[in-house]
Image (spheres, rainbow, N blue to C red):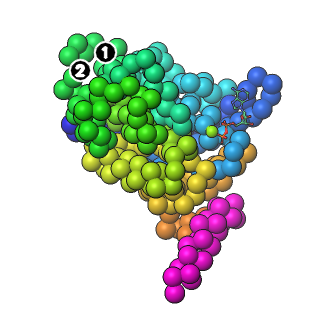
């Protein structure tokens, strides 16, 4: 199941909501195909708004977003979204449908009549027993539900996966396991992944590139290695200081 990872370009993107809040303020950047990017920042810094300009849940007030060089504004949103996987905190599985039916939603919309084999393949991809396909969502753990959400998001082989605090409601062990699983999946199927998180440690451990957002702007853009070395500037240093200090204290405890 080789996929074509996609590049994403933001050209001077701004979003002012009705009421006057400038949530995104002139963001320009290029995410190359195959990259795993983490978008980090305080609550209200504009992370979700910026992410949603990619799949047109938000249309920018100014500027444009391109996927593989083509403006997203040129494509009807429902078709665009079939090519973009999207996972968010409470993934919103339909409670009255089985796991398999939930995973198959996008496949059915795309005209697939016999999705069973693909559904089994997708459940295996997210390391779930295909037998879970027969269960209802409320008979799964939180971590299993998020895995189903990822399987559903990847059903139509999107090549681009957007995730907005997907691990937010999970306990730390489940969260860590799912993060590693997503990172492995990203590499295995050749995705471009943009992960929104407020957790700098998670961003450093999972991403190839970390973007820090504050007040609608990208204030740092660096590799985890450069961030840890303090090369990304003051706003980023303040965020990196937290996990670094925790790692130091934990190491000291073990001595
Ligand atoms: P983050 O994901 O970093 O927490 P958001 O993109 O959700 O940030 O929000 C950025 C700013 O835009 C915040 O001030 C928020 O209150 C505001 N905002 C977000 N969505 C809307 C909306 N639909 N209408 C008006 N203001 C919004
Ligand atoms: Mg958000």
Of the 4 image quadrants, the one containing the N terminus is top left
- Viewer-proximal residue, 129 or 244? 129
Total number of numbered discs in the rendering: 2
- Picture quadrant of residue 5: top left
* Secondary structure under the numbered disc 2 in the rendered image: loop
The crowding category of the residue bearing disc 1, from other C-alpha atoms within 10 Å (few below 14, some 14 to 19, many at least 20), is some
In the rendered structure, the answer to whether residue 44 lies left or right of residue 39 reads right
In the rendered structure, the answer to whether residue 2 lies left or right of residue 19 reads left
Find disc 2 in the rendering and name its residue.
Answer: 115
Q: Give how far across and how far down residue 58 sits, in percent.
A: 60, 26
Is 113 rendered above or below residue 130? above
Find disc 1 in the rendering and name its residue.
Answer: 108
Q: Is residue 75 visible?
A: no
* Secondary structure under the numbered disc 1 in the rendered image: helix
CB within 8 Å, label 1 to label 2: yes
In the rendered structure, the answer to whether residue 229 lies left or right of residue 137 reads right
Instruction: Tell me which residue sits at (26%, 39%) in the image.
Output: 129
Q: Which residues are magenta?
A: 233-255
Q: Going from the N terminus, do you reach mark 1 or mark 2 first? A: 1
- Viewer-proximal residue, 174 or 242? 174
Is 94 rendered above or below residue 144? above
Instruction: Tell me which residue sits at (58%, 58%) in the image.
Output: 200
Q: Is residue 6 magenta?
A: no
């Amino acid at each position: 199941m080789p996929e074509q990872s996609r590049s994403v370009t933001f050209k001077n993107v701004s979003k002012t909501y009705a009421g006057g809040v400038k949530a995104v303020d002139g963001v320009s950047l290029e995410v190359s195909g195959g990259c795993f990017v983490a978008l980090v920042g305080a609550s209200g810094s504009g992370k979700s708004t910026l992410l949603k300009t990619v799949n047109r849940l938000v249309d920018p007030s100014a500027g444009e977003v391109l996927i593989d060089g083509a403006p997203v504004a040129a494509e009807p949103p429902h078709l665009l979204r079939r090519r973009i996987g999207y996972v968010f905190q409470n993934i919103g599985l339909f409670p009255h449908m089985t796991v398999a039916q939930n995973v198959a939603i996008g496949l059915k919309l795309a005209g697939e009549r016999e999705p069973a084999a693909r559904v089994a393949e997708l459940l295996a991809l997210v390391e779930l027993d295909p037998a879970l396909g027969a269960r209802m969502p409320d008979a799964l753990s939180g971590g299993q539900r998020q895995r189903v959400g990822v399987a559903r998001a990847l059903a139509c082989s999107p090549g681009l996966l957007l995730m907005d605090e997907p691990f937010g409601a999970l306990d730390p062990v489940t969260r860590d396991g799912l993060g590693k699983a997503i990172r492995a999946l990203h590499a295995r199927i050749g995705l471009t992944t943009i992960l929104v998180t407020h957790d700098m440690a998670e961003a450093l451990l999972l991403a190839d590139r970390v973007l820090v957002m504050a007040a609608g702007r990208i204030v740092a853009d660096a590799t985890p290695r450069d961030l840890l070395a303090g090369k990304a500037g003051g706003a980023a240093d303040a965020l990196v200081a937290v996990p670094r200090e925790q790692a130091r204290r934990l190491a000291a405890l073990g001595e």
